[in-house]
Image (spheres, rainbow, N blue to C red):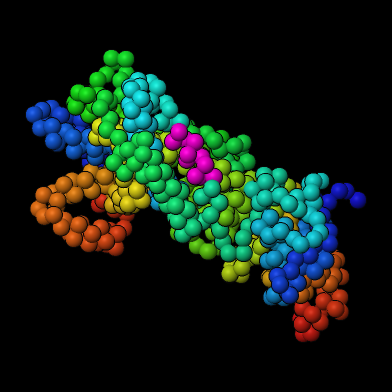
Amino acid sequence: MTMNRRGVVMTLFLITVALLPIALVDQPFYIGLFSRAMILSIAAVSLNLLLGYGNMISFGHAVYIGIGAYTVGIFAYYEIYDGFIQWPVGLAISAVVALIFGAISLRTRGVYFIMITLALAQMLYFLGVSIDEYGADDGLVIDVRSEFAGLIDLEEGIAFYYVIFFFLLLTIFIVHRLTNSRFGVVVRGAKSNEVRLRALGFSVYQYKLTAFVIAGVICGLAGLLLGNFTNFVNPDMMHWTRSGELIFMVVLGGLGSLFGPVLGAFVFLLLEEILSDLTIHWQIIFGPFLIAVVLFMRGGIDSLLGKSTDD
Amino acid sequence: MIEPMLKVTGLVKSFGGLIATNDVNIDVAPDEVHAVIGPNGAGKTTFIAQIAGDLRPDTGTIQFAGSDITRLATPKRARLGLARSFQITSIFRDVTVEDNVAMAVQAHDGHSFRFWREARRDPQLRDPARAVLKQVGLDHRCDVVAGELAHGEQRQLELAMAIATGPAMLLLDEPMAGMGAEESARMVDLLRSLKGNVAILLVEHDMDAVFALADRITVLVRGRAIATGEPHEIRDDDEVRKAYLGEDD
């Protein structure tokens, strides 16, 4: 089997990520940074399913991170730490919210779709801000991470790292299969020519809505991981600017490419880290960088790896 | 007489003060090529849009294959066997020719909530797609990205997609538009080879093509069907000559 440049780079990248904890045994800071990058990669890959493949520019995707994280937080608040309860509930709520939000927003197009996804997500943000019981603005501290009947201990940084790594690989694999399936053909077709798709006999709305729910559930998973990882949840996690950051990770990495959003999330976090070390005004550098990428690097980082193949 | 495939009764559509479709009645037999002609602004595109389901008529009914489809959404009409080509070529430009046709096959091979198996390697989609491409003479272009095809070939591809859905009726909106003489002739041959097996409603400006293919012709002028008949009747109709064909034609 021959491998193209993209395949080689991504394999090396994943091997590096897999071996990192061994190289950085006594560097919890970097383990943490990469854990976070992987979690946001999962969110970015799920957003790419909408943005890159389905041309659904959702500006409220961080809401599912909030839902996942709040699920862990609220359960922990009531001293229910069992992950076998927390996680299925978190994913189910993500699915239901995505179904409702998708059913409403997918009736609109273009700028209206963007604005409605943003507005719906902000509703949940303000809900979080207004509920005093769950800390309002300040959020909740998650003092105990999800427990899995002793099978795996998320309090152990390295074990947690590999749990996240596993879910990242799983997410990439699932999205890869999805986008190349019959379902994926329809979703991609909707990006390319929706009028034609309908004239062929596809009821496009149902397929887009399904994609919207799948993306919401995967992003909800990222939220479950993030809540556990940060030991904390607050409304800021689902603020629209967070959704904007996710969009940027996808665009930076490469819209509609399988691994692009992972690279985008890593580069985004590393740059944020490096620049904020240099100066507290790091956003003055970061902002123009983002603009330059959008203007001059069509196809994002992924395009540097050669002409895109069909995954 | 056998039951028509398409039966349009008393169709009316107006936009503000403009009546774009004014009490139009048309029927198309299952083995008939029925052409709709008319000068620019006659309302041909509005008419086609109502049959395809992109526009709702104000009044009137559209029956297709025995059922009333007047209020049915476009995809459902397509699944009943109403396939169309667009006036401006409408294909998936960023994937290959074969991918395009395979999507048409997929649209009529049950639902597409199939999430796991790779569609591009599914012989159930690819084999019929290749067969149709051979039928329209594009089989040597299977792996070309559709957007890179010549204009005439894109029109052929669009027709291939329509055929691949296994339709009971083709709704063709100016299939010869923008084609050279040679390409037009090839398209006429292709349509002639389909004749009899599928009902065809053909909107076309190219009069040579219309008279070569049509069993019957309906002339649309300012939203009204002023005449319907066999080609020789239409050619000899005084009103049609005055309104459309021109005195010296």
Kindly give the residue lying farthest to the bottom in the view shown. B248
Foreground residue among A176 and B139: A176
- Which residue appears at 62% of the width and 36% of the height? B110
- Which residue appears at 78% of the width and 54% of the height? B62
Residue interval drawn in magenta: A93-103
**Residue B227 image point, x, y percent:** 85, 70
**Residue A309 image point, x, y percent:** 35, 46
* Image-quadrant location for residue B224: bottom right
**Residue B57 image point, x, y percent:** 74, 60
- Which residue appears at 50% of the width and 45% of the height? A102
Foreground residue among A308 and B111: B111
Rendered position, B150 above or below A83: below
Q: Would residue A254 be seen by someone viewing this image from the given angle?
A: no
Q: Is residue A144 left or right of residue B84?
A: left
Q: Is residue B124 left or right of residue B191?
A: left
Q: Quadrant of the N terminus of chain A?
A: top left
Kindly give the residue lying farthest to the right in the view shown. B1
What secondary structure predominates along the stretch shown in magenta?
helix
Q: Quadrant of the C terminus of chain A?
A: top left
* Image-quadrant location for residue B172: bottom right
